[in-house]
Every structure is written in C-alpha cells, then in structure tokens.
Image (spheres, rainbow, N blue to C red):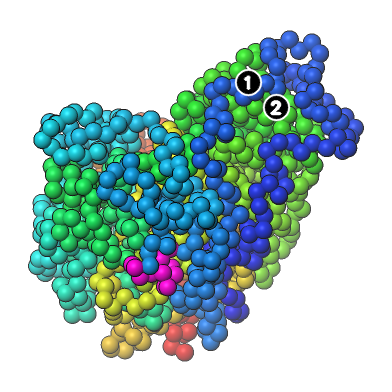
Amino acid sequence: MSTAGFNSQNGTGQAYANGPSQNPVAPHQLPGIGYGSTPQPTYDPMQAKAAPPPGPPGPYPVCSYRPGAPFVSYPPPSGQSMLTRPMMGGPPSHTPPQSASPGPRPPPAQATPPPAVSSSSYYTNPQQAPAWQYNTAPPPTGAPTSISTPPRGPAPPHVNPTASSPGSSLSSTAYSPAAPPPHVSHGVTQPPGPGMHRTPLHGYPPPGSAPPSMAPHAYQPNRAPYGPPPTGPPPSMNPAPPMAHATPPPPKAEGSGPQAPSSFNHVDSRMGGPPQPGPPGRHLGGHYPSLPLGYQNAAPPPAAMHPAIQAATQPYTQAPQPYQQPLGGPGPAQLSPSLAAMSLQSSTPEALRVVNLLQERNLLPPIPIPPPTPCLQQDLQKINCNPEVFRSTLTSIPQTQSLLNKAKMPLGLLLHPFKDLSQLPVVTSSTIVRCRSCRTYINPFVSFLDQRRWKCNLCYRVNDVPEEFMYNPVSRSYGEPHKRPEVQNATIEFIAPSEYMLRPPQPAVYLFILDVSHNAVETGYLSVFCQSLLDNINALPGDSRTKIGFVTFDSTIHFYNLQEGLSQPQMLIVSDIDDIFLPTPDSLLVNLNECKELVQDLLKSLPTLFQKTMETQSALGSALQAAYKLLLPTGGRMSVFQTQLPNLGVGALQSREDPNQRASAKDVQHLSPATDFYKKLALDCSGQQVAVDLFLLSSQYCDLASLGCISRYSAGSVYYYPSYHHQHNPAQVECFQRDLKRYLTRKIGFEAVMRIRCSKGMSIHTFHGNFFVRSTDLLSLPNVNPDAGFAVQMSIEENLDDMQIVSFQAALLYTSSKGERRIRVHTLCLPVVNSLSDIFAGADVQAITGLLACMAVDRSATASLSDARDAMTNAAIDSLASYRQSVLSIQQPGLLAPACLRLFPLFILALLKQKAFRTGTSTRLDDRLFAMCQLKYQPLVYSMLMIHPALYRVDDLSDEGALNINERTVPQPRVLQLSVEKLSREAAFLMDAGTVMYLWVGRSCQPAFLTQVLGVSSYAAVPDNLHLLPELDTAESQRTRAFIGWLRDQRPFFPPLHVIRDESQLKPTFMQNMIEDRTESALSYYEFLLHLQQQISK
Ligand SMILES: [Zn+2]
C-alpha cells in the first residue's frame, strides 16, 4: 500500500505527463530548435556516406538520393523518359502556399508555458493511503502565475479566483482561445473590442482565437452574404436533405421586417429520422409533479428498447423545443426558491433504496443501464444535453468541496464532443452571442431579465441582447430572443465568422506512413490497406483542396513523387536516416483530385513493390520526422502503420518485456515510455496542427507504452491488431478492414481546440484523453474525430450555496473537411444540493466507474499498478462507508449500498480483472497498454462494455419483446450475470465485450442451433477460428445475425466475433471475463463483497 501523489493532466510520470507544468519539453523547446522542425532539409554534405543500397525492385524508376551533393542537383537516373517536367519546380498552382496566409501561423503548443494545473494534492491524505480523496480542491497555485507568463491561453476567470468577479473580466477576454472580439451588437464590421488590444502583447493567439485587431477580416469564407430575413413561411424543421447547411436561405429584401443576418438550418448528417415534436409550451416556475423527485423526468423507455442504447443510436432529436420563457419572468437561474425546496430526503427515491449486497444477488438489470436523470425541473431537463455527449459522475453537484469530500465520490465530466449526431442544429450568424465577461456561448440555461438583457449562467454577468439576436430565424419572428435556436438547444453548432480564423482554414491533408519491412510484408497488411484506400478514396472527407501523400520505410525512407503530369509515380529513396530531408518537397503531398490517377497507380503497385524485400530493420523515428517535415506547412493527419519494434535510428526501442514475468511479477514494469522521443515529436506535431494516428499490427512486443505517445499528445488514435496475419487471423483482417473504412471515411475536424467552462466556483483540474493541454481549460486537438471521448475531473473551489443550478459548457472549435471554421457547443445543467443523501441519489455509477478507470491508468504509470488497484478498491470502500455513516439513519447488518450504487463493487471488481489492471494472469504488456489507451480514449458507453461485458443466451432467441428496425426483427435477450453458473452446456452464449464478441457454444448445445445457426452437423464440426456466421435461410440464423448486427451497428468500430468451443485457444479469454467467479489469483464477487464489508466495518 503506497501513497503516491496524484498526477495531473493525463500524466504518466514527471517526464511524460501531458500537463504543461510537468512537461520539461514544452516550455523550453521553441519551434525550429528541436530536431526535425526546420521545413527545409538540413542537409550536410560532410555526412556523405557510401551510396545506399539500390532500392527494392519495382516498376518505378528509382531516384536514390545520396548524401554528398546538394539534392537539387540529383538528376533522375538516365533514360528516365517519364519525367515530363522538372521535378524541382515551384509548388503547383493549386497548392495553397503558406505565404498566402493572411494571419500569423499559430505557434506550436510547446512554446507555451501554460499555467501549472497540478493536482498533486488530489490524493494526498496520508492517513488514507492509498485511498483516493476525491476532489480536494487543489490550491489554484498555477492559475495566478499563468497570467504573468507570456502565453496565449492563461487561466479563464473561473479558474483564477482573483479574476472571477465579473468586474475584472476584461483582462480575460484577450486570452479566450476561441474568443472573437467581445460582442458588439453592430455586426461584423465592428472592429474587435477593447479586449483584443492586448492580444499583440502576448504573441500569437492560439488557432481559433480572435486574430489581432489589425487583420480581423483578412479571410472571408466563401459564404453568401447575409441579408434581411427571407419572406415566406418558417423553414421546415424536418431534417430534410442534408443540403446547404452552410448556406443561409437566399435572402430576399423585405422592407418592413427587421434586419436579421442569420440563418438556421439543421444538418442531417446521418439517417435523420423526423424530429420528434417538442413538448407543448410550458411556463417556468410552475408546480412540481407528484412523482418522486429526481425520477419524474425520466422518460419511460419505449417498449423493448434499451434506453441507454436508444440514446446512442436513435436520431438525436434536439429540435428546438418550445421552451417558453416569459420575458421579464424568472429565468432558469432564478428558479432558486422553488428548486431549493426540492429535497430528496422527504421521500426516498429508488436511487436511495437500501440494498444489502450480500443478500441480493441478482442486481444486474436485464437491459443496459440508462444514465440517471438529473433532478431538475422538467423544463430544464427536457432541453438538457444528451448524456451520451456530456455526462457527470454526480448528477447533483455538492454545494461545497467539504461536502464532496464527505461523499468520497469523484466529481468529473465525461464527454463525447464530436459524436456523430443524426441531427444537429447549425446556426450561421455574423454575431455569435457570448458573455462579455467569461465568453460563455449563450445557451438554454441563461436567463433573460427582459427582452434586451440576458444573464450568464456561468459567471452571472448581465449582458445586452444584440439587435441581431432579436430576430428568430426559425420562426422568422422578431422580439423573441428566448426562442432562438441557441437558447433552445443544449447542443448546437455555429459556422464561425471570420474573426475566428487566423489564416484560411487548413485543407484536409492526409499523409500515410507505411512500414514495408520484411515483417510488414509478411503480415500482408499492405494489400488490405491499399485496397481499402482505393475503395474509399472518393469518400475521404475533403474538398477540392484535399491533399494526399505517402511515405514508406524500412531501413531507409521512401518518398513518392505524385506530381501531376508524371506518367507514373516515382519513388525517391533517402538512406541518410540520421539527417532526414525531403527530396522534392513540393511534389510529395499532392492535390488528390488532380493527381488521383497517380495515387491509384501507386496503391495498386505498393503491395507487390516490396514483396521480395529482406530488409528487417525499421527506422520509424526517421520516417516520422520526414512526415512531420512534409506536413509542416499545412498541418493535417498522419496515419502510421507499424508492424514491429522500431530498431534503427532515432526513436529506436528495445524489447522491455520478459514473457516469463507476465503472470508472476508482483508489479508490472514498463508501463511508462522508454524514451521521450515520441512525446517530443508529438508535441512538435501538435504545435503544427498535425495529429498522428497509429495502427500497430504485430505479433511481437512493440512497446506501445513508448509508441503510443505519438498519438496521445497529438490528439491521435491508436489501433492495435495483435497477431495480425492475412492468412492465420481472418477475424483480425476483417476487423482491420472495417476499422479502416470507418477511419478513412468518418468525419474529421482539423486544427481544433476544445475549451471547457464551468460555473463560477467550480474548476477543472485534470483531463483524460488524447490531446495536449494548452492552458488550464484548453485542449489542443490538431484533429478531432467522432469516436474520441474525454474526461475531466472537477473540484469545487467556492461554496455554491447561493446557486440552485450550475452549468458546464464544452466548446469545440474546428475546421471542417470542407474548410469551414465551426464551433460545436454543448451545455450541461445540473442542480446543486446540500445534503449527502441528495449527492448519493444522483450518483451515476457508470460515469464514476469510467472516470475511476481513467484515474487508475494515470496512477499505474505514475505510481504502480498495485497502487492503482488499491486505490480502486478503496474508492468502493470509501463511498460505501460514507453512505453507511452519513446517509443511513438506521444501522443494519450487511454490506449496504444505495440502489444507484449497487453495481459499484461489481464494476470495481470488473476493473480489477480488466486486461488493463489485472494481475496473476499472463497479460502481454502491449495488450495491457492498449486496454489502458482505450479506457482513457473511448466514450463511456464503449468503455463500460470493455469493463463489464454483456452476456446473452442466444440459442433460444425469440421474437418476444423484439425490436423492429428497418423491417428487421431484432431479438432482445436479457443481460446475464458474468458467472459460469449462468452458462449451460446445452446452450450458446454471446458475450459482447465492446471491441470484441465471443459466441461460446456448449459441448451439448442443441443440435438445432448447430445446424440452423452455425451450419454444422455436430459440436465437433464447429471449425476453429470461425468468425463469420453463415447466412442461412432459417429463422434462428436470421435472429442471431440480426441481434449481432444490431449490437455492432451501435458502435462506430467493428467488434470481431469469435466462435469458441471448449478446445478453442480463446476460451481462457472468454472465461477471464466471468468477473463474478473466483480465479486462482482473484476474488469472486462474493469474496470481494466480504472484503469490502470487512474494511468498512473496521
Ligand atoms: Zn459569463
């Protein structure tokens, strides 16, 4: 039992923490100083070496660029008739040259010395080792200093108590990363407000921030001019064709109407069912329903539909609700007296029903658990943010930090900010209305004092309603600002006016870096990759400016000249990997539309090009440096495919895993990176708006702890396919193919930043996910993708006693693949409570588990795995002990939990047995590291399945209670406990573990299932490695496939299916997920409960 301090900011130890304050690289490394950061080749003729070996045989003429002469003088090999023009010409005319940028380039993130946001005091109660003392408000040590540093993103007012009063707000305006000039009601032509004048003093603002006042309008997006409100009927709110979301309806002159330069459309990006009609208009401050408080708002789930899944899969109807806020009447922020009367203690809701865990065994609900509904007035809850997007561990916020400390539960938010939404309100407006003081975007939880004034729900400043906002583009009426879409939707997207741009929005740029060593060729991944890109090349998000490029590598780096006009691609080999340079910088990243044929030629040839290579070395580090140089001028996305441990040149790694130690070691070593090379490079990339996604396909140890840093700090994604082989592992191949299709075609946002604001008195102190923390509440995301989740830990710094509700707002500013600057804003509203029972009643056990998992990953790296495990166990002990001591009025024997936390011990036990944290079982280090990556990066709904898989019996599926989706009947079997007790030899069971599914077939399984679902005559005939169910024309086959397909459809990635028998290699993996059972090294659920009870009664 140790008492390691708590790290901050996604940190994994001092040298590798993401936290700027702990990052020795960040403050000291300026652009251009570090390796590989100069855009031009730093070619040194003195380093001439022997001529490189000839390139691999292939159809392309090879230009071997040898060190020893200026590279511009290298002639192509003689007889190269294919070159129709000089290779070293200037950039093609279609290439947007960097110099055309009107604004300064955003500086690299690492140049910023952001304020310290250390949360080392977080777990510092020495008496409680190693318990996690939740949310001990860290002294805002870092915040004040941040103002005096010369950064671009210092503390926002609510982080720095000294700046938190509305009066002192102007100083923060200039720092606001996504801040346009303070709002002025006169429209776009107004120069930036006074706050902007400070900007130049502090150097470059971050991307997405308001530009310096001298060039606010240098870039004008190609958008139709705004005009007066159009005539005619209001636009239909039906999510009709996904057209023209960026274009306001053609304006028509209308003499009498007010000028309203704004428009409002729905983007229907997905299936987009018709929006559900909003509730009838209601007035605030009315009566309360008679149902138990806190539950009256929970809409009953539609029959036979899993509510949790419904939220994830159904069209996200955020159609404007007719939320009628009487002008001059009380706004949400002023509902206090009535809300204050709400107390959960008078009537005991279901959430607080006392459960003796030692007696009640069947706690698992038959359907996935829906998130709890905050105890808010119906009016507010109806327009609150979708919990799939924005969710809190506690849906009732404690009034004080000391109250939170007593509850012993973590306070934090879980976000899925760029989630694919079937319906998203999009506003095009020349004026985005924001609080003058704290820069909060106007949202449904502000209050209107009258028609002309609104009060911010985060800092409580009263702001003017701009004239433009008086016009409602939805109803096309004037004088109802509270009916604007911004005030009716907790999730909304703005198309940003030009103040939000520093330079023209970057084009979509995709660079692929491919391992072509012998090992890579052996796996056969290259042909799958090339075919997948060929198939999807027209579906890559982008526009006419989209660029693409390729780099391959083994012991040397190979570039591909794809310049328009060449008759075929030209391979250029650079063998001096110690001093990498770009042979023809202008023709390696090319316009996709103009050079598509050459790109296709290359993709068709690549798989065979290296077929006979015997090169076993891997110079990944140099390839990444080269790729970084290539993307330096534009930013973009780097997709790296690696199949082995890099073993040559910079970033070379050595195997750190001893397979014999996997199961026996008391503690697991090497969870931290072996080198800071990949982190440093990632920070360089982040500073230049480059994200790196890593695809690791390997059967050997690759040191994901080190390699993963390249994605983690650049806001990339990590994909891992252990034992990938094109013949031996068909399930992996299918998974890789599906993942690639999703990866290549999913939405992408470039040069993004995300800021999370919260009501005055609260603060954020630790972030989890893949990003670089640029300042206390600002994340740098060179790319953002719809599958990325984030978590933040919060603390309460000032008493919230005069507040009834608090709000949280996440604003994601990004450049779409079409080159539009957009801002997606999510606002979550939660009640403030002053009793422990109310806090417990609002506990969201899944969100708590998800946040604890993130914290435990950090703890594993900064302290040790055993420390993290102890801390998780203590989390359950502490919260249940607090409940017993402080909430229960009558003491009774047993292990008691409120109903809302009844699954908490089970989920903690599941975490202890999860691949990321388990001990006593042979777990490959990379498998463990990847599980840790996923727990930090996946949205909660998917990580919960990884933690506690869902088990279903599937040999007796029936249509009873089935869903009907697109004329397909989808059976809905109940979720079973994860115990061998539940298995039966006569049956078949499906286990859905999120990223993978197992279909376990009992030895005496009914013959009907074998023949009609698996298409085999007997148990013995079930083939090994079966991963595809045959498409049989039987009702049983259709039901089974419909159910599995339906589960798969609910997530953006593809979980492979493994059919397993007793003899299967994967059977132990399946059995390890039987969390409730005892194993040699781990307690059963019942034993774990006894352990908890023992600790609590101590
Ligand atoms: Zn404000």
Magenta extent: 156-167
Residue tagged 2: 584
Quadrant of the rendered image containing residue 269: top left
Q: Are marks 2 and 1 in contact (CB under 8 Å)?
A: yes
Which residue corresponds to the image point at 54% horizontal and 66% vertical from the top-left? Answer: 148
Which residue corresponds to the image point at 15% horizontal and 55% vertical from the top-left? Answer: 451
Residue 970: x %, y % from top left:
30, 42
Residue type, label 2: Thr
Precedes in sequence: disc 2 or disc 1: 1
Residue type, label 1: Gln
Which residue corresponds to the image point at 40% horizontal and 56% vertical from the top-left? Answer: 195
Residue 321: x %, y % from top left:
18, 49
**SS of the residue under disc 2:** loop
- Asked if one can make out residue 193 in the rendered structure from this viewpoint, the answer is yes
- Label 2 and label 1: CA atoms lie apart by 10 Å
Using the image, tell me which numbered label, if any, was put on residue 563. 1
**SS of the residue under disc 1:** loop
Residue 664 included in the magenta stretch of the image: no
